[in-house]
């Protein structure tokens, strides 16, 4: 890879990064308020920043560097359900989960209770927006690479893993602040930020925190619904005291820096995390190593090898079907862009970040739910 045209310190942990992603990262590093940057092993081009980018600033927060799905991330819940019992009823669980959980653009017909929302600080804009159906979005999955997975690790422990974010609420909040930051009042792909001590910056950080809490509650609600469905068919329960939550779209103040993570997972020393691969290869439970050059981060997944349209054009449904043998999932033309071949090799990605995280468990899928 070519050296980047910047004096800002940076580190690239990926072995091969497409030129479009390098240009995006280089442009972010050239901003006067940028102090440091890192690219994770799953990096590929995105919106404003590459997916897999981590950028630290001095007193500036950039909404486009967090992105539209504020707080998108993963929860992993270890359970006491029997692997054998779950595998025996996987087909029934698959059908029941689609009946219990809205996917794609669907929401719940009624509000899902979330008492904590009333006490969370929020701007008048967000409070009004949230009152227009925010609670109906809780417990809905979304589409694209969002998923629910039931799998097992090397010790046959069954895990519930949820990948979802802040749904339409987060998208609307991101759009609002990207418009405010943009010079022409439109949500632009660019490096337009707020001073964190000024009103727009303070409001964005407050509403960002609300969306992070909302995204976490959404994943918890999804995991609760999955646990309920499994418990109707199998004996056992989730170990909620060991729930892992880690999001990968946020900005935070840490280590005396404003750290933006766009498709990158916080990986402080000893911090538990979840890194998914694809529908076939499952997810990894990890423990962070707190690498300063990575800005205390790791990859957030395998990273796409093919864009969605490219995957639909070039991948074979027959090959997709063959690659998914043994996993109960939506294996059809509508999910071809989520086929394992559309993603980078997760095992190579994990090997490239052995200095960033330690693998604790490899959770292999029994069934996978997608929008």
Image: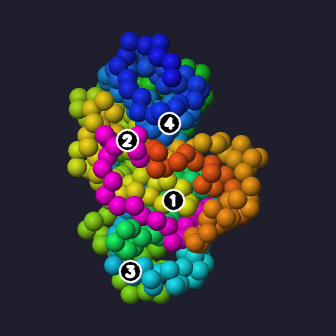
Which label was assigned to residue 81?
Answer: 3
Task: Say what secondary structure mark 3 lies in.
Answer: loop
Q: Position of residue 209 (x, y in %)?
A: 36, 45
**How much space separates mark 1 and mark 4, taking CA atoms?**
19 Å
Q: Mark 2 falls on what kind of element? A: loop
Looking at the image, is mark 3 or mark 1 earlier in the sequence? 3
> Nearest the camera: 354 or 210?
354
The residue sitting at 42% across, 70% down in the picture is 152
Q: Which residues are magenta?
A: 350-371
Return the mark for residue 298: none
Whichever of callouts 4 and 3 sits on the residue coming sooner in the sequence is 4
Residue identifier under label 4? 43
Label located before the other in sequence (1 or 4): 4
Residue 111, above or below 46: below
Asked if the stretch drawn in magenta spans residue 355, the answer is: yes
Report which residue position mark 2 lands on.
Answer: 353
The residue at 28%/28% (across/down) is 257
Separation of marks 4 and 2 at Cα, in angstroms = 12 Å
């Amino acid at each position: 890879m070519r050296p980047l045209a910047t004096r800002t310190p940076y580190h690239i942990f990926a072995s091969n990064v497409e030129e479009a992603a390098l240009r995006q990262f280089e442009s972010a590093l050239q901003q006067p308020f940028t102090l440091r940057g890192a690219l994770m092993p799953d990096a590929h081009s995105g919106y404003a920043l590459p997916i897999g980018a981590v950028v630290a600033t001095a007193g500036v927060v950039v909404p486009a560097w967090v992105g539209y799905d504020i707080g998108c991330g993963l929860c992993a819940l270890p359970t006491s359900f029997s692997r054998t019992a779950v595998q025996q009823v996987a087909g029934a669980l698959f059908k029941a989960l689609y009946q219990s959980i809205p996917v794609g653009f669907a929401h719940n017909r009624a509000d899902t209770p979330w008492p904590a929302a009333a006490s969370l600080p929020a701007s008048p804009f967000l409070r009004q927006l949230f009152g227009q159906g925010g609670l109906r979005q809780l417990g809905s999955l979304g589409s694209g690479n969002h998923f629910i997975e039931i799998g097992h690790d090397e010790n046959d422990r069954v895990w519930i893993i949820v990948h979802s974010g802040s749904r339409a609420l987060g998208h609307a909040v991101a759009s609002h602040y990207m418009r405010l930051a943009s010079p022409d009042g439109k949500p632009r792909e660019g490096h337009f930020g707020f001073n964190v001590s000024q009103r727009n910056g303070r409001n964005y950080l407050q509403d960002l925190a609300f969306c992070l809490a909302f995204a976490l509650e959404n994943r918890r609600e999804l995991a609760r619904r999955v646990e309920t469905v499994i418990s109707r068919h199998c004996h056992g329960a989730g170990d909620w005291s060991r729930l892992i939550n880690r999001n990968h779209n946020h900005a935070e103040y840490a280590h005396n820096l404003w750290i933006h993570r766009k498709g990158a997972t916080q990986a402080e020393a000893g911090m538990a995390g979840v890194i998914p691969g694809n529908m076939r290869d499952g997810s990894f439970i990890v423990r962070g190593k707190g690498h300063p050059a990575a800005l205390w981060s790791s990859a957030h997944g395998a990273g796409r090898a093919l864009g969605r349209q490219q995957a639909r054009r070039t991948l074979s449904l027959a090959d997709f079907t063959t690659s998914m043998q043994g996993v109960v999932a939506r294996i059809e033309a509508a999910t071809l862009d989520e086929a394992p071949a559309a993603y980078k090799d997760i095992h190579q990605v994990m090997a490239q970040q052995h200095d960033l995280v330690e693998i604790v468990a490899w959770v292999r899928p029994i069934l996978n739910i997608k929008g």
